[in-house]
Amino acid sequence: MGGAKVLKQVDMSCAEAGAWACRTDVPDVPQPGQLGPAAGRPVLLRPYRVQWETERENDPVFLGEWQALLAGSTGPEPIYQSPDFLQYIRATSQDRAEVDILTVRDAGDGRLLALTPIRYRDLAMGLQVRHWRLKLGSLHVGTVMGSAVLGDESAAVLESMVRFLLAERPRVVALSLPALPQQSHIQQSLQALTSSQRDLGACVLNGWRECHKIPLPGDFNAYLAQFGSKHRYNLKRQIRLLREHAPLELLRVDQPASVDTLAAAIDRLAPPEVKAVLISHEKFVVMARLGLLRSYVLQSGGVPVAALVATQYGQTLHLHNVLTDPAMLRFSVGTSILYLAIEDLSSEARFSAIDLGYSSPSHSHQSSNRVEARGHLLLYKASLRTWALCSAERLFGEWLERAKSWHQAVKAWRARRAAAAKTA
């Protein structure tokens, strides 16, 4: 089994030097084209001290402060805000400048008020339909890892961070928040900031989209109790049919020695476009070593027929990919592996949810899901080029949504005509 733990013999069933910055009651607003002080020069304002603290990433005192803020995180993806994920990046990247740690401290007593890891990358901008994409250009952005700031998310603190970062990193033209919840405090603060500052703009790429979470009550029987008797019967029946087809095993992949099992499943089940974006075998091993990997493979007769590519942090399992064997779809292997994985997660009281991210799930657990609108927000330095790229992507996205609505309306009309013809 490549070291994977056999969970069940089913008998029944991938974000220096310090400086000063802050905000007065009436902040000085740079004129268009002026980003503020020269990089590295102190900016004496009140009441915040904004600085890079990347060099302290291994300092036990600093890590304690970081963990204290992380414990109170309300962001959608705290895994990416964690010291553990920064360790993963350091272990798999040759470029130490890829990630900075930006902090805000009280200018008086030095208390850590806010922190966010910033990961730099070139963001491709263009028009996309499924796996087809027309690239129009790219923007060098600083990604706010976890799409949230740890600690104080007030407009004053966020403005001090934004001004400092854009002044210190001239190549950065925008901040990227890939999974920003629409109904969140940081979204409200950013909206207030951009509406009051003429030299900053914002856009939501591809619009606000549904993100699904599966709540886990802690006990598997309590989870099943959310469904009606027919639903529960169908779930158990799917497992029984799989068992009758061939011996069934659920394998958990959360240790370096078991990554080969996941790699074999990916090689067999993932289509080429998915393989192209998945991380490498070596990165999966590092993630497992740091305790961030928790994936599952379902084998039928010793052959992988389904896999969940997932990571874990705190109380949440983040589900990134569901891979299935097309030849086994009649057995609902996608639903079955999720059912069995939830049973395993429920055996550990610490898990409270499975985050499916951006998705429109078709599995039979959808009725118990909680839906949250999230979007990829860009907070950018006002420029004609950036505005044009954002506008082109936004307008195309709006047209695409209308086209989808028209397509669904035509399908429904044809179905009604066909039904009427049968009864005629």
Image: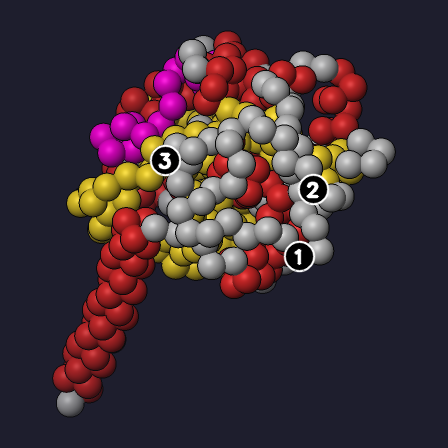
Amino acid at circle 1: Val
Q: In the rendered image, which residue does mark 3 sit on?
A: 140
Q: Nearer the viewer, mark 2 or mark 3?
A: 2
Q: What percent of the width, then of the height, locates residue 382? A: 39, 52
Determine the CA span between mark 2 and mark 1.
11 Å
Residue at horizontal 21%, vertical 79%? Answer: 413
Determine the CA span between mark 2 and mark 3.
28 Å
Q: In the rendered image, which residue does mark 1 sit on?
A: 26
N-term mark: 2 or 1: 1
Q: In the rendered image, which residue does mark 2 sit on?
A: 45
Which mark is drawn over residue 315?
none
Residue at horizontal 19%, vertical 74%? Answer: 410
Determine the CA span between mark 1 and mark 3.
30 Å
For mark 3, does the 10 Å Cα neighbourhood hold few (<14), some (14 to 19), or many (20 or more) residues? some
Amino acid at circle 2: Leu
Above or below: residue 260 compared with residue 414: above
**Is 283 contained in the magenta span?**
yes
N-term mark: 2 or 3: 2
Q: What percent of the width, then of the height, locates residue 197? A: 52, 58
Q: Magenta stretch: dominant SS? A: helix
Instruction: Identify the element where label 3 is drawn.
Output: strand
Q: What percent of the width, then of the height, locates residue 80? A: 56, 32
Left or right of 363 in this view: 226:
right
The reply to whether residue 189 is visible in this rendering is yes
